[in-house]
Image: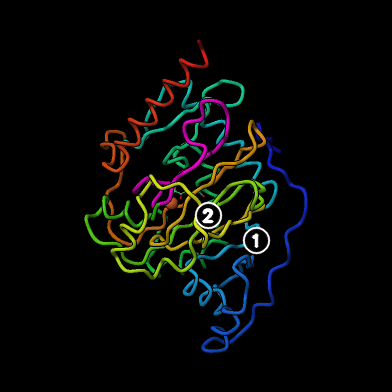
Amino acid sequence: MLVPRHPPDWSGDPPPAPYDESSGGAEARAAAGALPLSTRFRLGADITPIQAEFLKKNGFLLFDRVADTSEVSLILAEVDRVEAELKASGRERVNGVPVWFSPDPDGNDYMVRMGFSSQYSPALSAFVRDPRFEPVRRLIGEDARIGEREKDGVVFNRYVNAPGSIRPNLAWHTDALRDVFYNWKMPGPMLNVGLHFDRIRPTEGGLRLLPGTHTQGVFSTLFSKIHFVTQRADARELAVETWPGDLSVHDGRMWHRVESSPKTGWASLRRSMYVPYVIDAELQKHENSPTPMYLRLFDRIFRWRAARARRRLGG
Ligand SMILES: O=C(O)CCC(=O)C(=O)O
Ligand SMILES: [Fe+2]
């Protein structure tokens, strides 16, 4: 079995999924409404009426460990391998999307975000296309497809809190804004699908959501916080607790952020992967695709931060 450089913490079992059976309608709405926001659902052959109602009401769903331990290890090891390949070739972007490196706890360059990761890994590509995700695809739309070469492709994030880290967290944002930049249209319904590879307790940073904000008006979607700038905790935020292999679905219009781990060093590591399900016609990206506008400013900021961190650590 492939072993990643930094295996996740496998200890401890999560609480069981709720009893989740209902024929739909008012009964499902009432059952979903009674469930706590921390509910961990089980992904079956179909999205159940209770799951659909929970998503409609709260704007997100969390599924218990859809990837098993060997799959989690394989994916993390594949990302280690892809990272080594990118570093060896000195590659700074894939299909125009920047790859960002940040000093890790050992002072080496560590890949913290890359797009199109599945393009470098047949194993990753096969995993995201596995039939178990079919109900998630249908939830997004009967015609939805996985855009491995569209938008930013399969995005892999690694957050680590070490001296000089350029991206230990991610400020408040809605993913819908990104779509405004990509397609020049106002945000409509969209769902984002993420896989989580680390054991993150609510006290350990991680994904924070503002439940219910997916139904806000366009004005609040755009302006109720400053996109990618506002960092501070919100009294209404939910800390998403994860076990390695969990899958989340969140509405792209909902406000969310990633809180930095209070730990430092490798104990702070958190990894996530977002799979782009697309419905509309999108541009197929290629080697010479330009850097998307929304990433250009971030690219300058992160490269500047990384260069400054390297200078400081080196000197
Ligand atoms: O790492 C995560 O779980 C969230 C990442 C995110 O919100 C984003 O990349 O837009
Ligand atoms: Fe996001």
Picture disc at residue 64? 1
Q: Residue shown at 27%/50% (left/top)? A: 182
Q: Residues within 10 Å of mark 2 (few under 14, many from 20)?
A: many
Q: Which x, y percent locates residue 175?
A: 38, 54
Look at the numbered disc 2 and give the secondary structure of its residue: strand
Q: Which x, y percent locates residue 64?
A: 65, 61
State which quadrant residue 14 falls in. Answer: bottom right
Q: Residues within 10 Å of mark 1 (few under 14, many from 20)?
A: many
Eyeballing the image, is 202 above or below 87? below
Eyeballing the image, is 181 above or below 160? below
Of residues 188 and 125, the one drawn nearer to the viewer in this rendering: 188
Q: Which residues are magenta?
A: 147-172
How many numbered discs?
2
The image's colouring method is: rainbow
Q: Amino acid at mark 1?
A: Asp
Residue 86 placement, left or right of 22: left
Q: Main secondary structure of the magenta part?
A: loop
Q: Is residue 245 inside the magenta stretch? A: no
Look at the numbered disc 1 and give the secondary structure of its residue: loop
Quadrant containing the N terminus in the rendered view = top right
Q: Residue shown at 41%/57% (left/top)? A: 277
Of residues 218 and 22, the one drawn nearer to the viewer in this rendering: 218
Q: Amino acid at mark 2?
A: Arg
> Pointer 2 and pointer 1: residues touching (CB < 8 Å)?
no
Picture disc at residue 208? 2
Eyeballing the image, is 144 above or below 153? below
Picture disc at residue 199? none
Q: Is mark 1 within 8 Å of ligand 1?
A: no
Distance, label 2 to label 1, CA atoms, is: 17 Å
